[in-house]
Amino acid sequence: MNIYVVQPLHVTIRDLPPTMIVYTSVLLQQMKGSYNDQIRDGFENIKDWARQQGYDPSALKVIGIPNINGAQLIGYECALELEIAPLNTEDIHTKQLPGGRYAILSLEKDSATIGETIRRFFAEYVPQHQLTVDLRRPNYEIYYEHVMDFCVPIQ
């Protein structure tokens, strides 16, 4: 007998401050291996850049910003929280993530369950708690050692 236990969603509602980031964009291409590998390479590139600038990437907050078209992940911004002067080179850019009210879904960094957990958040939690997603601001992910926070702007 196979019993599937649905884990509860761990969500908090918080006001987050605007956050300055330095990032590189990854245009995801299906022919170039898995998306995970392409995104991992993007994070390695931004961390290498930070090291070259004299920063310790392990001391900086790691942030990912998915670019989705419909249900398809088409791009990803691999970022580090870093207060620096505006910068736009061929590969490295800066911008400010908007602050405001966010629903923050905390989950384990397990690629086998992340997609389903986020799907449940939008399909179950958002309507059950009568949240309105603010489509003018991006969703973003904050990575820690074993967990991640999926931050969804709400009105």
Image (spheres, helix red, strand yellow):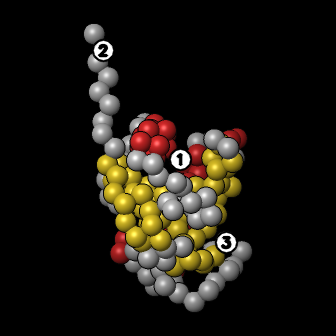
Q: What amino acid is labelled 2 in the image?
A: Asn
Kindly identify which numbered label has been placed on residue 2.
2
Q: Is residue 148 above or below residue 112?
A: below
Q: Nearer the viewer, residue 122 or 25?
A: 122
Asked whether the residues under the numbered discs 3 and 1 touch, taking CB atoms below 8 Å apart as contact, a structural biologist would say: no
Question: Badge 3: how crowded within 10 Å, few (<14), some, or many (20+)?
Answer: few
Kindly identify which numbered label has been placed on residue 36.
1
Mark 3 secondary-structure assignment = loop
Label 3 belongs to which residue?
91
> How far apart are the alpha carbons under marks 1 and 2?
30 Å
Asked whether the residues under the numbered discs 1 and 2 touch, taking CB atoms below 8 Å apart as contact, a structural biologist would say: no
* Residue 33 horizontal/vertical position (percent): 62, 42
* Residue 129 horizontal/vertical position (percent): 40, 47
> Which residue is painted at 31% across and 53% down in the image?
146
Residue 53 is at least partly visible in this image: yes
> How far apart are the alpha carbons under marks 3 and 1?
19 Å
The residue lying furthest to the bottom in this view is 85
* Residue 40 horizontal/vertical position (percent): 52, 55
Which label lies toward us, 1 or 2? 2
The residue lying furthest to the top in this view is 1
Question: Badge 2: how crowded within 10 Å, few (<14), some, or many (20+)?
Answer: few
Q: What amino acid is labelled 3 in the image?
A: Asp
Q: Is residue 92 above or below residue 119?
A: below
> How far apart are the alpha carbons under marks 3 and 2?
48 Å
Q: What amino acid is labelled 1 in the image?
A: Asn
* Residue 106 horizontal/vertical position (percent): 35, 53
Mark 2 secondary-structure assignment = loop
